[in-house]
Amino acid sequence: MLKRLRYKLLHHLQLPESWLIFFIMGIIMMNFPFMSIFNKPETIFGFPLLFLYFFLGWPFSIFVIYLFTLTVGNTDDKHQEPR
């Protein structure tokens, strides 16, 4: 089951549309109108929201980039769907 899920995830990340969607989402997330949502005086566990947004958003975006790099070297003939 885990192998099938990994195969499907890597297969969908090979599609050019998913690359474009994540690129546009990254641009939107780091632009002023979206970041102003988190620029509030409230805190969570003593940390400002904007601080948490940056320090939780960056690892997530790095993880997405890591998933994309996994798909660069993989081709369909190397990975066949497990049965």
Image: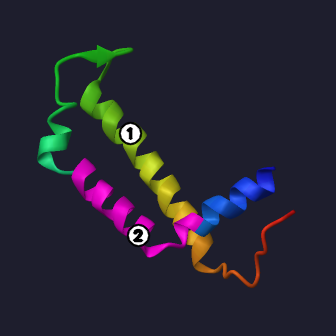
Q: Residue at x 44, y 65 (%)?
A: 18
Residue linked to disc 1: 55
What number is the disc on residue 12? none
> What is the three-letter code of the residue carrying label 1?
Phe
Label disc, if present, on residue 17 of the rendered structure: 2
Which SS does the magenta portion mostly show? helix
Of tags 1 and 2, the one toward the viewer is: 2
Q: Residue at 76% x, 82% y: name it.
A: 78
**Picture coordinates of residue 57, whole percent (x, y):** 38, 43
- Separation of residues labelled 1 and 2 (CA atoms): 27 Å
45 with respect to 76 (left or right): left
**What range of the chain is rendered magenta?**
12-29
Please state which amino acid type lies under the numbered disc 2: Glu
Along the horizontal axis of the image, is 40 left or right of 59? left
Q: Is residue 14 magenta?
A: yes
Which residue is more in the foreground, 14 or 60?
14
